[in-house]
Image (tube, grey):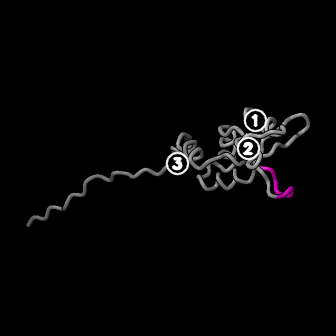
Amino acid sequence: MQSINAMLEASSSTKTPHQYYLLKKYELLQCGDIDKLIKQRQSSEEPPLYFVTIEDTIKRAHIATGHGGRDKMIHELNKKYANITVDAISLFKSMCMECQRKIKRPTNKGAVAKPIISS
C-alpha cells in the first residue's frame, strides 16, 4: 500500500531521486477502481508481473505442484509474480509437514559383526 501511494506521489511535477527510482522500477496497473503494483514492462505485450503478499501465494503454488520441489515452485511462480525469492520458497518448504515426512532419512542398519569361525 505504501508503494502504491509513493507511485501516485511520484507522478507529481517535481520528483525526488527516490521517486525517479520508483518510476523506473515499477508501474501501476489500474483494474477498475483498484490500483495494482507491477514490475516495469519493456513492452505492452509482456504479461504483468504482480507484487503480492507471498505467504498465501507460495502455499497455493506449493499445493498446485503437488508439494513439488523448490525448482518446480520457482518455475510456476515466476510466470506471474515478481517478488517471490528462492529463500522464501525454501523456508516455506522446510516448514511444510507433509514434505518433512517425504524426506528420506538415512537408516541405521546396526553394527556388522564378523562371523566367529571355530574349528
What residue is rendered at 61% in x and 48% in y? 85
Left or right of 4? Residue 34 is right
Mark 2 element type: helix
Query: Which numbered marker is on residue 22?
Result: 2
Query: Which numbered marker is on residue 6?
Result: 1
Marks 3, 1: nearer the viewer: 1
Comparing 66 with 81, the one in front is 81
Mark closest to the chain's N terminus, 2 or 1 = 1
What residue is rendered at 80% in x and 57% in y? 42
Mark 1: amino acid: Ala
Q: Which residues are magenta?
A: 43-49
**Badges 3 and 1: C-beta atoms under 8 Å apart?**
no
Label 3, residues with CA under 10 Å away: few <14, some 14-19, many ≥20: few
What residue is rendered at 32% in x and 53% in y? 109
Mark 1 element type: helix
Residue 61 coordinates in the image, percent (x, y): 68, 46
Mark 3 element type: helix
**Badges 2 and 3: C-beta atoms under 8 Å apart?**
no
Mark closest to the chain's N terminus, 3 or 1 = 1
